[in-house]
């Protein structure tokens, strides 16, 4: 069988075998509803609380009760924004960046129809955010500032602690979409200014369909999903018990793997990136240092991203692109456009996102085939490469 | 291979036929642009006596289906007379590939347009294939698609929905601001025109001449030039005389096939904010 090289870990990750083992009994044997009174089911509630402890610990949260389990990063983001608006009555403005994930962007676009004003902060050519821009945008009408901790396409990190402090100066809440950051960079909610933080299970080797929202103790919170008393009345709906247990285990593993992520995975990424830059007419999109350790976004001038991906796929390599043909819309990625990446580079952008299951052999394989793919596509292209 | 491509698409994508450019071509057809995300340059060699296309070559920037559509098109037209070749529709191109995913149909439309353009060029006709685009009213500013092109493609492919129109022409696939207008065109074609009263125009403030010049300069500097600079282009403001704004395009904008679009976009922007009578003139050289 052809070797599979999975370097699309920002899209989703392989469920860690240890995570699967942890969740398995909750699917097969111990299927009780944690709200039931009998012993068979109520023991499951303990597993949920253990997972909550594990999740809290991984992001350095002081109290396990600051974790609310949800269905996804998107639900967590939506909940945070809604809750902030509801608990900051009279404040009708949200401040976000132009490069937020659709979980935030689409929500905000929807809220505009409800009379909420949304201020979108620009980013620099390297994808970084200026705190001066945030300061300028702030006033006492802002209910919440929501900025991602790390960008999903470029891996660029935002200064969330400083941003949260600025938000607080104006009495606004601060939410961060940390879906891509958890497990890859150290987070310590105990000493942090952040009020709310969204994360997702399937980005950290838990299965799809589970997420969590951190809400700092003492912050007012309004539930988004209305229903039963689950999650202390903060999120209705019978708990995704197996998913929650999986997320807890995955969070615990993240703590163990953090040093590896910062060391071994970063070294793999750096070698891959250096090798790719040997191909002429290439550039890296995003700040080289203020970045996630496993992500690189490289543009190949005058070739189109989907065509590159299809060729990579032929070699068993799974990556993704910010090109128009793959962005779901017909325009290239909003992140690259916000950074001002020229069209002839934006259409040819490829994101490689590495993780704990990648090896040196994976990098070798990509570097062996990439120059040939680009050369072939450039032969076909009517535009010059350099 | 993903994206639900047929084996035929895969074959022509991985091993495209007739790649390149005929140096002494009799007809050249160039459509699309790098900004739009796909572009095709088709060159043909025609036997003057028999009118048979003896050779066809292509260069394409685009996704898998754009490359496959170009490749199969060159295979199809070789050996055909010009008249026969012109009968090839975008559906024929898609069919020859065993079908294309709906959202990729615009790739076949691009092939058909390149063919028309190459034939027009061979016959010495200027842009005959694209008169509809030149004369029509621009509906989709993201991709420069006119109502005339939308009507033509809708008719040729019996399109019914907004989604169809986007799949075949790309119109509406960018910011999406033109979706309502596309729906109106479709309703009109279906003969179910609903009279929608035009929204009241926002009152334009009366500006002094100085204010007006300052505002034009500001819009050009803050909104227009950064967009052009992203693609290594730029513009220079030469003069403002009454309602006429004279500019010169520089860098990559010079000679860019999309520069006509760019000018219309600038004009639209100025009209919207300052004065509906503004006219933008493009000068090749400084005044």
Image: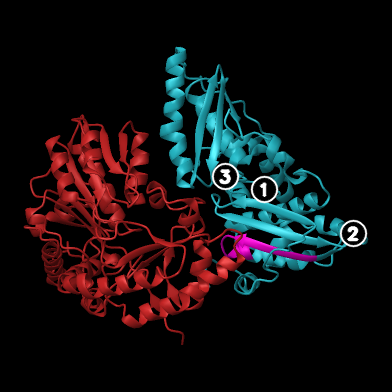
Chain colours: A red, B cyan
- The residue located at (62%, 45%) in the rendering is B257
On the image, the x and y values in percent for residue B221 come to: 43, 32
Can residue A376 be seen at all in this image of the molecule?
yes
On the image, the x and y values in percent for residue A315 come to: 48, 78
Tell me where residue B5 sits by quadrant: bottom right
Q: Which residue is mark 2?
A: B48
Q: Residues within 10 Å of mark 2 (few under 14, many from 20)?
A: few
Q: Which residue is mark 1?
A: B159
Tell me where residue A384 sits by quadrant: bottom right
Could you give the CA–CA distance between mark 1 and mark 2, rounded to whole angstroms? 38 Å
Which residues fall within the magenta stretch? Answer: B55-67
On the image, the x and y values in percent for residue B137 come to: 64, 33
Q: Answer with mark 3 or mark 2, whichever residue precedes in sequence.
A: 2
Q: Are marks 3 and 2 on the same chain?
A: yes
Q: Are marks 3 and 1 on the same chain?
A: yes
Q: Answer with mark 3 or mark 1, whichever residue precedes in sequence.
A: 3
Q: Nearer the viewer, mark 1 or mark 2?
A: 2
For the C terminus of chain B, give its image quadrant.
top right
Q: Which residue is mark 3?
A: B143
């Amino acid at each position: 069988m052809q070797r599979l090289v999975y370097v699309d870990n920002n899209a989703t990750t392989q469920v860690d075998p240890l995570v699967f083992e942890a969740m398995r009994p909750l699917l097969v044997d111990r299927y009780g509803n944690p709200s039931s009174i009998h012993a068979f089911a109520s023991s499951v509630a303990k597993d949920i609380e253990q997972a909550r402890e594990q999740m809290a610990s991984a992001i350095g949260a002081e109290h396990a009760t600051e974790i609310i389990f949800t269905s996804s990063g998107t639900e967590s983001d939506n909940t945070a924004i809604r809750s902030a608006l509801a608990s900051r009555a009279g404040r009708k403005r949200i401040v976000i960046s132009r490069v937020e994930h659709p979980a935030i962007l689409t929500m905000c676009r929807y809220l505009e129809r409800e009379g909420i004003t949304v201020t979108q902060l620009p980013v620099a050519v390297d994808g970084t955010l200026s705190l001066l821009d945030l300061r300028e945008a702030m006033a006492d009408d802002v209910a919440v500032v929501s900025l991602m901790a790390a960008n999903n396409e470029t891996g660029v990190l935002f200064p969330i602690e400083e941003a949260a402090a600025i938000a607080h100066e104006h009495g606004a809440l601060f939410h961060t979409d940390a879906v891509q950051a958890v497990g890859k960079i150290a987070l310590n909610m105990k000493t942090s200014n952040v009020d709310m933080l969204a994360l997702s299970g399937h980005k950290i080797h838990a299965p799809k369909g589970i997420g969590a929202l951190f809400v700092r103790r003492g912050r007012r919170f309004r539930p988004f999903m209305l229903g039963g008393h689950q999650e202390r009345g903060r999120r209705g709906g019978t708990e995704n018990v197996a998913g929650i247990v999986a997320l807890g285990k995955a969070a615990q593993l993240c703590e163990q793997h953090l040093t590896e992520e910062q060391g071994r995975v970063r070294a793999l990424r750096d070698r891959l990136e250096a090798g790719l830059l040997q191909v002429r007419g290439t550039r890296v999109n995003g700040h080289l240092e203020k970045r996630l350790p496993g992500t690189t976004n490289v543009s190949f001038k005058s070739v189109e991203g989907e065509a590159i991906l299809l060729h990579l796929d032929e070699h068993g390599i799974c990556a993704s692109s910010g090109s128009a043909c793959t962005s779901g819309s017909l325009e290239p990625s909003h992140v690259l456009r916000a950074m001002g990446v020229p069209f002839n580079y934006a259409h040819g952008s490829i994101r490689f996102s590495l993780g704990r299951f990648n090896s040196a052999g994976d990098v070798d394989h990509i570097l062996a085939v990439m120059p040939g793919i680009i050369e072939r596509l450039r032969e076909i292209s009517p535009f010059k490469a350099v | 291979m993903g994206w639900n491509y047929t084996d035929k698409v895969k074959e022509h994508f991985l091993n495209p036929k007739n790649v390149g450019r005929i140096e002494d071509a009799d007809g050249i057809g160039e459509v699309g642009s790098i900004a739009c995300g796909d572009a095709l340059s088709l060159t043909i060699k025609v036997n003057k006596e028999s009118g048979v296309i003896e050779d066809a070559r292509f260069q394409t920037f685009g996704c898998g289906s754009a490359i496959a559509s170009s490749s199969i098109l060159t295979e199809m037209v070789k050996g055909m007379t010009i008249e026969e070749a012109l009968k090839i529709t975008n559906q024929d191109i898609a069919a020859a590939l065993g079908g294309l995913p709906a959202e990729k149909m615009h790739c076949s439309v691009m092939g058909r347009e390149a063919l028309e353009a190459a034939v027009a060029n061979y016959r010495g006709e200027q842009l005959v294939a694209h008169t509809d685009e030149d004369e029509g009213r621009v509906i989709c500013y993201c991709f420069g698609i006119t109502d005339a092109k939308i009507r033509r493609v809708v008719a040729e492919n019996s399109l019914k929905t907004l989604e169809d129109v986007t799949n075949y022409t790309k119109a509406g696939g960018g910011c999406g601001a033109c979706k309502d207008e596309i729906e109106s065109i479709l309703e009109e074609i279906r003969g179910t025109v609903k009279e929608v009263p035009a929204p009241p125009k926002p009152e334009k403030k009366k500006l002094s001449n100085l204010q007006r010049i300052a505002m034009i300069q500001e819009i050009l500097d803050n909104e227009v030039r950064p967009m052009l600079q992203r693609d290594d282009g730029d513009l220079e403001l030469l003069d403002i005389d009454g309602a006429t704004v004279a500019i010169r395009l520089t860098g990559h904008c010079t000679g860019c096939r999309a520069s006509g679009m760019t000018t219309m976009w600038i004009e639209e922007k100025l009209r919207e904010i300052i004065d509906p009578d503004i006219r933008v003139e493009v000068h090749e050289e400084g005044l």
